[in-house]
Amino acid sequence: MNKPIIMAMAVLAVFFSATAVSVPVLPAAHAQYGVGGSPVAGASPEQLLECEQYDIPKANCTENAILAKRRLIYAQENPSTGSGTSMLSTNAGQTWVFIGVLAAIFGGVAAAFFFKGRGATPPS
């Protein structure tokens, strides 16, 4: 190995070891859930009533839980709409068109590299 590669690997090793040591020291983010760990602290009375209506435990009564339950109920009542994942809920023809376009793009790039590499002359 030559000296620049060894130096670059040493710098990368120092960088990654410093990152691995500093990550556990950093504080966790509690923006959505509150510092005390109680998600109910910020729930409004309307949200608590809706949690009771949907049989969500009071300890888990958050806006995300309510929205997830609404989405689940809507998907159960309207099976033709699917789960909310647009790629899977569209028509099968649209999915195959999307896959075909991606295959054409990546295949074209691969073919360009292949033919470019075949036409290259080896160094003497």
Image (tube, helix red, strand yellow):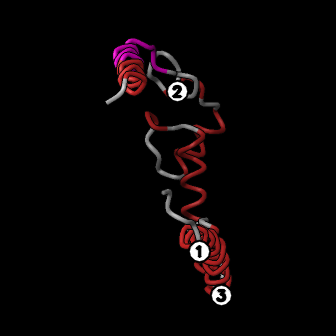
**Which residue is disc 1 drawn over?**
115
Which element type, helix, strand or loop, lies under badge 1? helix
Does 114 appear above or below 124? Answer: below
Where residue 85 sits, quadrant-wise, is bottom right
- Mark 2 or mark 1: whose residue is earlier in sequence: 2
Q: Residue at position x 43%, y 33% from top? A: 59
Q: Main secondary structure of the magenta part?
A: helix
Badge 3: how crowded within 10 Å, few (<14), some, or many (20+)? few
In the image as oriented, which residue stretches furthest toward the left?
1
Q: Describe residue 6's horizontal placement relative to residue 108 as left or right.
A: left
Does 25 appear above or below 84? Answer: above
Which residue type does callout 1 highlight? Answer: Phe
Mark 2 and 1 residues: CB-CB less than 8 Å, in contact?
no
Indicate which label's residue lies in the foreground, 2 or 1: 1
- Mark 2–mark 3 Cα distance, whole angstroms, equals 42 Å
- Mark 3–mark 1 Cα distance, whole angstroms, equals 32 Å
- Mark 3 or mark 1: whose residue is earlier in sequence: 3
Which residue type does callout 2 highlight? Answer: Tyr
Where residue 103 sits, quadrant-wise, is bottom right
**Which residue is disc 3 drawn over?**
93
Q: Position of residue 98 (x, y in %)?
A: 66, 76
Magenta-highlighted residues: 14-28
**Which residue is disc 2 drawn over?**
33
The residue nearer to you, when weighing 105 against 38, is 105
Which residue type does callout 3 highlight? Answer: Gly
Q: Residue at position x 64%, y 74% from top? A: 108
- Mark 2–mark 1 Cα distance, whole angstroms, equals 55 Å
Q: Residue at position x 34%, y 18% from top? A: 17
